[in-house]
Amino acid sequence: MSDFDSKRRQRFLGEDYFKWLLASFSENIASWADRLTPIGDTENERKALTRGIVASDSYRRFLLMYTGGADISLLRDEFDSVVSAFEQLTIAERVHQADARQPPLAFSEIGDYETAMQLIGFCYLLHRRDLLPRIVAMFDPAYRGKDTLYEDLLAYELEGRVDVDSWFHDVPYRPLVFSLYREAQQECVDDITQYLEAWYPGMAAAVWHDGHLEAQKGGKGTYVGYWAIEAAAVAYLLELDDSPFRDHLLYPKDLAEFARNFDPAKGNPPALPNNGPKTVRTGQVCPETGIWKAQGHHVPGVMVQQGERMPDVFAPDRSGAYRSQPALWEFERKA
């Protein structure tokens, strides 16, 4: 057995395929940093499509790294860049659609829905709960109060969530939702076991389903790992003994173990970004005096003093009427 075979977390992943796909994702992400796809009728549409490519590749690269055996403490820091990629997609989509509620992923599509639940699950399993408000800012305008699993996962950290008794996809998610309402832990364990069995066939409509078949034939496929991240998050939040299902192929047991054993006193604080533009949201404290520009709005930058609260942006809404609205501000230059 090679060193890679002993490190990989799912048996479908071959070393040559892993190396090729990881390099491909990295090159694609870098190549789209300063150019736009030619597809699209308008510049705003091309920007949205480009940000979609980067967000998808960033997340798929992240999952591939986990499947390939990457150190989870490194993934904990890497996760911030994944969330940032989806934030950039959200901004671009809202401008393109002229709709401030537009989410980066559509809950009606099961592959998108699963990605959203995984993003929330990773926040808990990687001890990056500090990223949950950023995820909420992307999805709440469209989906607050519309999905039980979404609301219940967020409620373990965030106050004021909505009690709702409906969800977008009954298959395969019903057992996982039920596990959050059981009185006996054994019932929760049984529910999650049932969920893990239902997960893969329930994802048949996702674009990546059966991607491992091409990867195993030496093709280029779409396989980056099959992981029920949200199942591990629920098991962790409910403090379940996961031994009955921890060796299930789709259960990310290393993530669950990391979540249970993480000690913030020993370090690993959230990494501060140092290789990109400074950004801060309306209502947050300005970190540096200078000119700040509202992302996604074609309006002049504004002068903000360090220590002041970041303002709303006065810009046109979807009807063309100018009004004050929240914004993500990017540092442009010193005053």
Image (tube, helix red, strand yellow):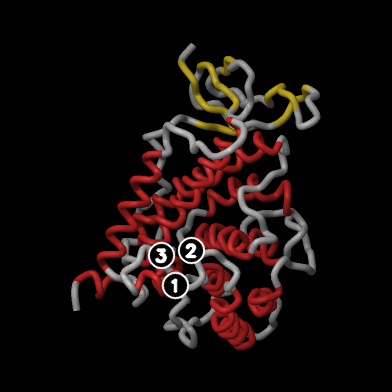
Disc 2 + disc 1, Cβ < 8 Å: yes
For residue 2, which quarter of the picture?
A: bottom left
Indicate whether 213 appears above or below 78.
below
Measure the C-alpha gap from mark 2 to mark 1. 10 Å
Q: Nearer the viewer, mark 2 or mark 1?
A: 1
Residue type at numbered disc 3: Gly
Q: As shown in the figure, which amino acid type bears the numbered disc 1?
A: Pro
Q: Up-down: is 207 above or below 288?
A: below
Q: Which residue is mark 2?
A: 125
Q: Is residue 80 above or below residue 266?
A: above
Instruction: Give the mark, 3 or 1, whose residue is nearer the N terminus.
Output: 3
Residue identifier under label 3: 221
Q: Are marks 3 and 2 in contact (CB under 8 Å)?
A: no
Q: Classify the position of the N terminus by image quarter.
A: bottom left
Instruction: Give the residue pinned by disc 1.
Output: 252
Element marked by disc 1? loop
Q: Position of residue 206 (x, y in %)?
A: 57, 66
* Residue 178 in the image, given as x and y percentages of width and height: 69, 78
Residue displayed at 78% across by 63% down: 163
Q: Taking 329 as reference, is 225 left or right?
A: left
Residue 213 figure quarter: bottom left
Q: Secondary structure at mark 2?
A: helix
Marked residue nearer the N-terminal end (3 or 2): 2
Residue type indicated by callout 2: Leu
Local crowd at mark 2 within 10 Å, few (<14), some, or many (≥20)?
many
